[in-house]
């Protein structure tokens, strides 16, 4: 289990940072973003050379993991994930496949699992970008 530092960025506002948070507190911080638009949280585990970016747009999130060996994005398990939807990351509108956009609650579970046990997840898998 790793504690983490988080930085929360909202378009047009100063970023907010918090340090030394346990995994469940990080997950709660993500859940608190449900319904927000144009919000990005960067999570950096203590002593790790990687960070996880969680972008939230309404009820969906996008998770990108940057490591020394490259970038990965999270793919959620589920049915009916064939479509594409408009999604805002840091104020930039994009078209992103539904399979990369879990519900915010699912994203919180993925992040908590990542901080506790690494990349193995009960919610989906990481895909190299």
Image (cartoon, rainbow, N blue to C red):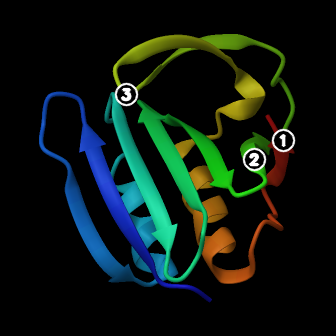
The residue at 46%/62% (across/down) is 43
Determine if residue 77 is in view. Answer: no
Viewer-proximal residue among 67 and 82: 67
Residue drawn at 61 percent across, 76 percent down: 115
Splitting the image into 4 quarters, where does residue 92 fall? top left
SS of the residue under disc 3: loop
Query: Which residue lies under the disc numbered 1?
Result: 128
- The Cα atoms of the two marked residues, 3 and 2, are separated by 21 Å
Q: Nearer the viewer, mark 1 or mark 2?
A: 2
Determine the residue positioned at 67% across, 69% down: 114
Can residue 37 be seen?
Answer: yes
* Residue assigned mark 2: 70
Instruction: Quadrant for the N terminus, please.
Output: bottom right
Give the image location of residue 20, x and y in percent. Answer: 36, 84
**Residue 28, relative to residue 95: is it above or below?**
below
Image position of 13 with respect to 46: above or below: above
Ranked by sequence position, the earlier of labels 3 and 1 is: 3
User: Dot 2: few (<14), some (14–19), or many (≥20) neighbours within 10 Å?
Assistant: few
Q: Nearer the viewer, residue 13 or 28?
A: 13
Residue 32 location in percent, x, y? 33, 55
Q: Return the x and y of residue 31 as percentages of the image width and height.
A: 42, 56
- Residue 83 is drawn in which quadrant? top right
Report which residue position mark 3 lands on: 90
Task: Name the residue at 29% across, 51% down.
Answer: 8
Judging from the image, what secondary structure is the residue with disc 2 in? Answer: strand
Q: Between label 3 and label 2, give the one nearer the viewer.
A: 2
């Amino acid at each position: 289990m790793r504690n983490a530092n988080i930085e929360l960025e909202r378009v047009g506002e100063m970023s907010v940072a918090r340090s030394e948070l346990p995994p469940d507190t990080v997950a709660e911080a993500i859940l608190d973003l449900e319904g927000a638009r144009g919000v990005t949280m960067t999570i950096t585990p203590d002593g790790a050379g990687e960070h996880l970016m969680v972008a939230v747009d309404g009820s969906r999130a996008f998770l990108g993991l940057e490591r020394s060996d490259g970038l990965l994005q999270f793919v959620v398990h589920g049915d009916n994930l064939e479509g594409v939807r408009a999604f805002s990351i840091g104020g930039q509108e994009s078209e992103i496949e539904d399979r990369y956009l879990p519900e915010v609650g699912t994203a919180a579970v993925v992040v908590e699992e990542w901080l506790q046990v690494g990349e193995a997840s009960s919610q989906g898998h990481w895909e190299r970008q």
